[in-house]
Image (cartoon, helix red, strand yellow):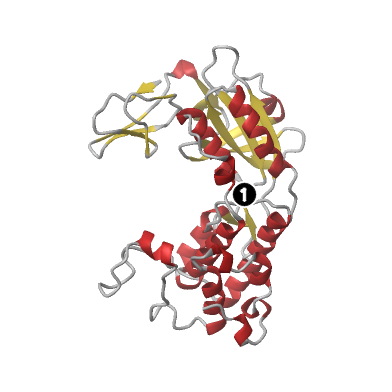
Amino acid sequence: MLVDLSNNGAFINETIIGRNNTRQLQEHDEIAILDRARFIFRYPQTHMARSTMFGQQYPLLKQSTAFLQQYTLLERLEKSSWCEVYLCVEKASGQRYAVKIFFYPPSNTTREKLQPILAIPMGVSHPKLLCLKDVFEDHAPDGGRQDTIFMVLELASDGELFNYIVAKEKLTEDENRVVFIQVCEAVKYLHDRNIVHGDIKSENIFMTDEDVDVKVADFGLNTFIQILKDSEDNSTRSEATAMGHKMGDIWSLGVVLCICLCGFPPFSDELYPEAFPYTMVEQIKMGQFDYPSPHWDAVGIPARDLIDSMLVANPHKRFTIDQCLHHPWVTQQPLGKQNRVR
């Protein structure tokens, strides 16, 4: 357990703790004090479980969990402030999956709030969504310090769309169209069921092969994490705010489309000259962006028109997901005046 007694602020995995606040430390947590010192937390050997296959160490998980009865935990794939992602294998089938492991302070209120959130991805099935296979909950005994949730997901072995874009710098319009349609189909499936993704970005779109076949991941995860945050800071943030809005997904899709087409986002503190003296936040609030040369020279007017229809500051004037899918750039039909928004 770490208690922050500093005057200038201490951070765990780049998230500030807050003076006099406490946090339960996990294996390999990075502790930072401003930019002056950084430490990696390690448990003593007696508190660790060892993977004989990879010769690596992992936090000791209770061997009685239903998850560990059905799955074998392998190497860690990534770590964030709120969860760790591991590779795992289903014992009965030998199939490989990814598992997100969340730790949070035990609370009946938090458990009650999480139940409907966890039920949403369990009831979702679409070929363009990276779907949830299993959820396991480990409740701490009375006096225990943390509950644990295991979310078992399909494994996308070809990595994030973000890394694919970095490697290629940007995608062609034809490649973009293929990716965009797949992501829109996934989002439409969610929106038709009144489900908001809430965190669409290239890091949450995964490649499943080399032919720009993709799947969308982490739908609803922002709401899930916000509830875990609320369990620690006693926030009074409303459920309606936490759930977000469908039009926010459209905006995010527009940003992803821009990044795929030109290689960088439409809003930035460094993107515009002195003649355009607005911060990134101000640009976003106004919906103010441009198509600078030479980065956009090869991109046609229909693609720009679609982006203009998505990155509209007023959400009531923004395209819906159905309008995105029927836009001439997507259907490859001639662009008419009725399609233009700006």
Is residue 128 visible in the rendered structure shown here?
A: no
Q: Is residue 257 above or below residue 302?
A: above
Q: Is residue 256 left or right of residue 19?
A: right
Q: Which residue is mark 1?
A: 219
| Quadrant, the N terminus | top left
Residue at image point 48% right, 18% down: 47
- Horizontally, residue 139 falls left or right of residue 105, namely right
Q: Nearer the viewer, residue 293 or 309?
A: 309
Residue 112 location in percent, x, y?
65, 29
Quick check: 199 left or right of 188? left
Residue type of the residue flagged with mark 1: Phe
Q: Residue at x 57, y 42 (%)?
A: 223
Q: Position of residue 206 (x, y in %)?
A: 59, 56
Specify the quadrant of the image occupied by residue 44. Answer: top left
Secondary structure at badge 1 equals loop
Give residue 49's position: percent from left, percent from top: 53, 22
Few, some or many residues within 10 Å of mark 1 (<14, 14–19, 20+)? many
- Residue extending farthest to the top is 142
Position of residue 66 relative to residue 291, above or below, is: above
Work out whether 263 lies above or below 334: above
Q: Position of residue 270 (x, y in %)?
A: 31, 65
At a point 24% along the width and 29% down the height, the residue shown is 7
The quarter of the displayed image where residue 272 is located: bottom left
- For the residue pair 206 and 52, the one nearer the viewer reads as 206
Q: Nearer the viewer, residue 237 or 283?
A: 237
Count of numbered marks: 1
